[in-house]
Amino acid sequence: MHPRFSSAFSDLPAALQQALQPLLDAPDFHGVLRPDELIQLQQVTGLEEDALALALLPLAACCAVAPLSRFNVGAIARGVSGHWYFGANMEFRGATMQQTVHAEQSAITHAWLRGETALAAITVNYTPCGHCRQFMNELNSGTAIRISLPGRDVNTLAHYLPDAFGPADLNITERLMTPVDHAFAPAGDALQQAAIRAASQSHAPYSFSYSGVALESHSGAIYSGRYAENAAFNPSLPPLQAALILMNMHHEPLETIRRAALAESAEGTLTQADATRATLAALGCRELTITLVSKTSV
């Protein structure tokens, strides 16, 4: 079991500990629970889905990176495939607060990067802020997504975000998590190609500034992230943060980035370059390759 989970694990009910132990001890546990594993957990504990997700929140919160607030928030995105994905808030010392990641964004993006195409519910240990409610309204689940909180009835996003403003108000039909392919041709080394593939799957229907980031850690692993744009603009999640979410879920310290690559559309109306470079520098990485791509690139 990764040490980050130890303290929360020891406080879980005995039956849940017994069922979870082999899952957390697996070397390939990176914050994802499969449908068969969840069925087993329910059978052993007698908990229904909402109760089980709430019981697991302390483990998700252990994934928080919160050097500024010291306030850990955990979230679990529950995919229509039956898979559950951990998420947690992330902060970066030396970067602006605008670069932080909220727990709901983390869990949702984690699911998206793992190939999940829609969410049924999200469980979080604190009421979603307005930023996160707006971020969730970009999803293809719309305001029908269920939100589960400790000590409260389960409600939909529509309950928490009445009279919502979203993509439809801007005549946008594309939704976050619906698979897309912008057909950018891979080029360069393995890291650059990973960034380009991420850009091809990014969500940017407002600015058309498709972008992706790939990070290489000191272990040699590569983590890719995609831009997730939002109808309200400010809750948009940069591609670097998406890659950092995945790196964090693989238990790699964020300060171990060896080099990074950013790929963005040559036809876009905005750039991620300056913000990406600044946040990477705060994490101790100054090697960034930037590639401009287009659908006609070779």
Image (spheres, helix red, strand yellow):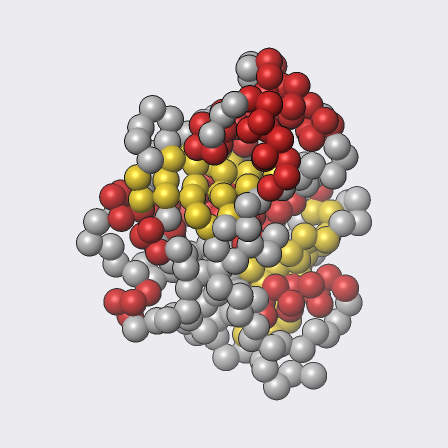
Residue at the image point whose x is 59% and y is 34% from the top: 39
Percent position of residue 37, x then y: 64, 35
Residue at the image point whose x is 25% and y is 58% from the top: 165
* One can see residue 49 in this view: yes
Residue at the image point whose x is 58% and y is 80% from the top: 294
* 45 lies above or below 236: above
Q: Residue furthest left?
A: 163
Percent position of residue 27, x then y: 76, 35
Q: Nearer the viewer, residue 230 or 57?
A: 57
Location of residue 174 by image quarter: bottom left
Percent position of residue 119, x then y: 46, 50
Location of residue 262 by image quarter: bottom right
79 displayed left or right of 145? right
* 208 lies above or below 132: below
Q: Residue furthest right?
A: 220
Q: How many marks on residues? A: 0
Q: Nearer the viewer, residue 266 or 149?
A: 149
For the N terminus, which image quadrant?
A: top right
Percent position of residue 62, x then y: 56, 28
